[in-house]
Amino acid sequence: MSQQAISNRHGEQDLIGRLKEAQAKFGHVSEEVMAELARSLDIPINDVYGVASFYSFLSTQPLGRNIIRICQSLPCYLKYGQTIMESVAQEIGIIPGETTADGKFSFQLTNCIGLCDRAPAMMINYDSHVDLTPKKIAQILGTYK
Amino acid sequence: MVANGKEIDPVGRQICSPMPACRINLLVLPFQVIAVPIKQSMARKEIENEITLTMNGSPVSGRAGMTILEVARENGIDIPTLCHVSRLPPSGVCRLCVVEVAGSRTLVGACHTPITEGMMVATHSPKILAARKILVELLMASHPDSCLICDKANICELRNIAADLEIGLPRFRARKHYYPLEYENPNIIRDMSKCILCRRCVVACQDLKGERLFSVAYRGFESKVVSGCDQPVDKEACQDCDECITLCPSGALRRPRRPGEERAKKALFIKG
Ligand code: SF4
Ligand code: FES
Ligand code: FES
């Protein structure tokens, strides 16, 4: 991966912008990309890794094609967010933090995604799904390939 | 470590010399009489920069740009610190140095708050003592219970402070970290389970050595000081300088003991 892989149109030190671009392009931020960014920005690779590992929408590990993020914050919890997590786990057979063997889904928990008014909520990739009930899960997951 | 002929510990505090400062003062008394006029003329020059404030009810003064902590230490008031190192820029992460400042909604960190004219500071009010105690209690609650067999045992700053504040057995049951020991580098052993995230090693590596081998990664409870992409410390870059190891206030960083080598440092006496 070279300089062209991550464009230079960002500001001098726009590390987050570049990391986001890499994430969008490759699905995750690999060590190679981080080393490349560190070199071009003249900062140590541990700083790049520190930033990349801080943000939950950046991943340093390869992920599945679709990323399920279920909200684990209080309002969703009070509206039985737990049952949503359980039914998703049952449906795709993995627990939060894992990726299915076929690479179709990655399952993660996230903090509030700003959809509390229609809790419980989850995001799959960048689509939001609200007012969830365990019954709706199979149908929603079915729409993703 | 020796600086300006005085023995100081890594944090910059003077270690009790065999001849206490008061006795030295008596000895040099005749010279002081001569020195006074010179000092006064210097003081007059600085007078514009002088800032007067009240600390624990008594008036003290400092120069513009000084922090509350520096003024307190100059006046013999002991504010405990964990992340602060006098020769490094303050990072203000441990919050152990908090003091009460009249008019401030929250407690402020003494190590990074500059003094202002007329400031009213309380350094040992009941509220502060309670806050400090809880802070250290929480640190100790999530610290592995391995002090007895820890290499830093008697020279551990964290333990020293815990003893000073009479923490005893922590009331809280906190989660603990269990990271594998990182001993791949021949110059440094890192036991991140004991790390209290004071970031001294991060700053020291950058400011004292110009290397930048450590950064804080992850978030919240998972936060951890890492090197590279959470890999063992680079053997080429980490060249046996020991700066971070001597500064680490807990047992997280230590130097691999070589056969036949004695422990170089004198053990501090810790009560409790
Ligand atoms: S390793 Fe030591 S110096 Fe570094 S952050 Fe942890 S406790 Fe502080
Ligand atoms: S708490 Fe779930 S979206 Fe805000
Ligand atoms: S010593 Fe001031 S915050 Fe740590």
Image (spheres, coloured by chain):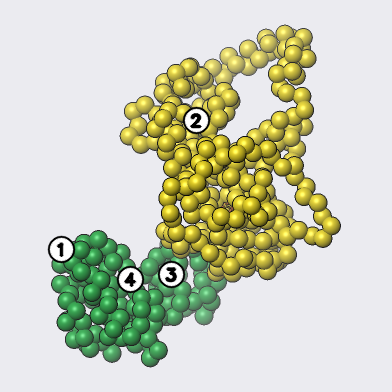
Chain colours: A green, B yellow
Q: Nearer the viewer, mark 4 or mark 2?
A: 4
**Figure quadrant of the N terminus of chain B:** top right
**Picture coordinates of residue B210 (x, y %)?**
64, 54
Between the C-alphas of marks 4 and 1, the distance is 19 Å
- Image-based side of B232 in relation to A102, left or right: right
Question: Can you identify the residue that label 3 sits on?
Answer: A19
Q: CA distance from mark 2 to mark 1?
A: 46 Å
Residue B23 vs residue B170, the one in the foreground: B170
Q: Earlier in the sequence, mark 3 or mark 1?
A: 3
Residues flagged by tags 2 and 1 on a common chain: no
Residue to which mark 2 is pinned = B68
Q: Earlier in the sequence, mark 4 or mark 1?
A: 4
Residue A44 visible in the shown view: no
Q: Position of residue B112 (x, y in %)?
A: 49, 38
Q: Which mark is residue A117?
A: 1
Q: Residues within 10 Å of mark 2 (few under 14, many from 20)?
A: many
Whole-number angstrom distance, CA of label 2 to CA of label 3? 39 Å
Left or right for B242, reference B80:
right
- Give residue A25's quadrant in the image: bottom left
Quadrant (top left/top right/bottom left/bottom right) for the C terminus of chain B:
top right
